[in-house]
Amino acid sequence: MPTCIEKSLRNAIIFLAKNQSPSPKIDASILLCHVIGMPSSYLYTWSDKLLSDKDQSAFNMSLARRAKGEPVAYIIGYHYFWTLKLKVESSTLIPRPETEHLVEMALKYLPQGKKRVLDLGTGTGAIALSIAVERVNTHVVGVDLRGEAVTLAISNQQENEVENAEFLQSNWFDSLPKQMFTMIVSNPPYLDSKDPHLLQGDVRFEPKTALIADDYGLADIRHICQHSPYYLDNNGWLLIEHGYDQGNLVRSIFSEVGFCDIDTVRDYAGHDRVTLGRFNR
């Protein structure tokens, strides 16, 4: 028998709560909106509308996936970041709200005018595209080791009609000989392989290669810091997102390489999130 939106949504919330969803009401609403192709306001304005058998079946399948812990973004295939709607796939990380701090700091320290920015480990292209849409005179290059990530970033570029960005497949700097940039940004892998967060929540479904780094999570950060001076203009900036407990260690790495004006910015939860430094020749 067909069920109205209100009852179907209520049952879904109860179901997800029993299956330990951290946000059952939000998850259920997003999944139902996606299935019926309507905004959230529709769920409450037309709560007595009956769902078709097809929509109810699709909703039930989505709920079953979420009950197993699969991220909502992977189920619906997109995620909002900054001002962008981005396609996401299981081959890339889901852009986090905390990463918007990296974008904010990049825009703060990036000089106006025709500049060049490099985004290392671009994934969905979230950071690169966010900077590009805010600075239309800046050319942003995003690179990623995985070809499927580059393809996804290019698709997101096209969907969001961003013209001043390009995406390349590269193992960090390897495909960028003799290119110089005003700023380099990165949200690299920074978790230790034994980090307990790898067994919790959405992270369980995300690609481990985009999360884990050797040397207690610092290997890729160290590599980026050591090689960035060869690709930075004089007085160019490097900004790196990292773990909440890595601020002191990352600042030390910046200092060892010779960066100046080093600082660590905290996120809204008060945790160290982005370390930045300027390289003066």
Image (cartoon, rainbow, N blue to C red):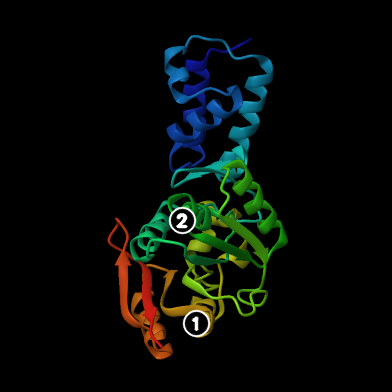
Snapshot quadrant of residue 164: bottom right
Write down the quadrant of residue 113 in the picture: bottom left
Name the residue: 40% across, 90% down.
256
Does 186 sit above or below residue 227? above
Q: Quadrant of the N terminus?
A: top right
Pointer 2 local density, CA inside 10 Å: few below 14, some 14–19, many at least 20: many
Q: Position of residue 119 (x, y in %)?
A: 53, 65
Residue that extends furthest to the left in the rendered view of this protein:
270
Closer-to-camera residue (170/220)? 170
Q: Residue furthest front?
A: 113
Type of amino acid under label 1: Arg
- Tell which tag, 2 or 1, sits nearer the viewer: 2
Residue holding disc 2: 131
> Disc 2 on helix, strand or loop?
helix
Q: Position of residue 26 (x, y in %)?
A: 44, 34
| Quarter of the image that includes the C terminus | bottom left
Residue 228 vertical position relative to residue 130 in the rendered view, above or below: below
Farthest residue toward the right?
147
Camera-side residue: 2 or 166? 166
Residue at the (57%, 56%) spot, across then down:
165
Q: Residues within 10 Å of mark 1 (few under 14, many from 20)?
A: some
Question: Residue visible at 38% across and 85% down?
Answer: 280
- Sequence-wise, which precedes: disc 2 or disc 1? 2
At 57% from the left edge and 63% from the top edge, which residue is drawn?
141
Q: Helix or strand or loop: what does disc 1 sit on? A: helix
What numbered label is drawn on residue 222? 1
Q: Is residue 226 above or below residue 155?
A: below
Instruction: Tell me residue 175's x, y (percent).
Output: 67, 74
Tally of numbered tags: 2
Residue type, label 2: Ile
Task: Locate residue 245, reporting x and y percent.
Answer: 36, 72
Whole-number angstrom distance, CA of label 2 to CA of label 1: 24 Å
